[in-house]
Image (spheres, rainbow, N blue to C red):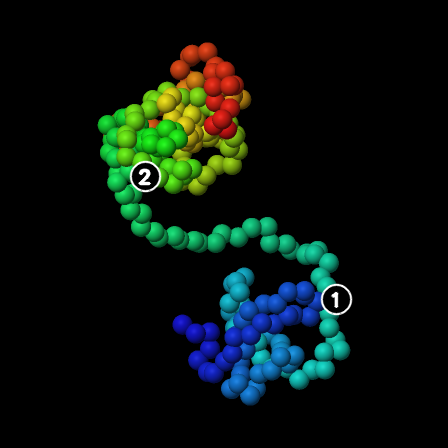
Amino acid sequence: AQPLATPFAWVLVRLDGADTALLHALDAPGPEAVHTGMRVRIRWAAERTGAITDIACFEPYGGDGTGQSAPHDGEFADPVTGIVTPARLDYRYTPGRAQSAYLDALSGQRIVGERCPSCHKVYVPPRGACPTCGVATTEQVEVGPRGTVTTFCIVNIKAKNLDIEVPYVYAHIALDGADLALHARIGGIPYDQVRMGLRVEPVWTEGGRHPDHYRPTGEPDADYDAYKELL
């Protein structure tokens, strides 16, 4: 899968008019044919699609360099307004003891955290150790299911393959009994009525392993002092 079937070098090329270098292949028969400061030019691919592979490679060029171009002014007759770039990320996650207990509880529509034996804070989701004290946590504590909105954001850009109409709200929610806010979507209320201090409860879907969203409980808003440490 090399760019050339003949000997070549990987080089950094600063194009005339540019202030940064471009990494690409240079068609060169051997090390003696390459040196810093040499002039090169682009060899274009026979078929071009608008990708970096449109540059087949660079090749040595015997010009004297006197015809260097001025920096581009940024104006294009037919500008590119967007591209679609495929991306893929594969990873394997091993939950561990604390996360496994948390996920198992979610399957029963319960939310559990773990309490630090030193500072006594309850962390949800638990990680098996207190992030502040650095000591192991083993005592499980059931929290929620209700909680308080601490901060939130309004989402105005529709995500691909996500069947949620914009605008919608994602919020940090301090579950009752927890000392760490988690984030979730807020539903059952117009987006412009979501506010700090709003009391919410989880909405579970049939067969879901975690709450689909949180909705208002109808309770009075929580006092700011009750959640200010969890912002």
In terms of secondary structure, where does tag 2 sit?
Answer: loop
Q: Identify the residue at image location x=34%, y=35%.
A: 126
Earlier sequence position, callout 1 versus callout 2: 1
User: Which mark, by number, is residue 13?
Assistant: none
Q: Nearer the viewer, residue 168 or 145?
A: 145
Disc 1 marks which amino acid? Ala
Q: Residue at x 38, y 26 (%)?
A: 178
Closer mark to the observer between disc 1 and disc 2 = 2
Labelled disc at residue 70: 1
In the image, what residue type sits under mark 2? Answer: Ala
Quarter assignment of residue 128: top left
Q: Tell me if 30 is positioned left or right of 161 in this view.
A: right
Residue 5: x, y in percent? 44, 80
Residue assigned mark 2? 136
Question: At x 71% / y 61%, what residue is drawn?
Answer: 72
Residue 180, quarter of picture: top left
In the picture shown, does residue 126 fall above or below 58?
above
The percent coordinates of residue 77 (x first, y second) are 68, 56
Q: Which element type, helix, strand or loop, lies under badge 1?
A: loop
Number of on-image labels: 2
Q: Residue 72: tell me if it is visible.
A: yes
Q: Image height check: is 42 above or below 173?
A: below
The Cα atoms of the two marked residues, 1 and 2, are separated by: 62 Å
Q: Position of residue 149 (x, y in %)?
A: 46, 23
Q: Is residue 210 visible?
A: no
- At 54% from the left and 61% from the top, the residue drawn is 50
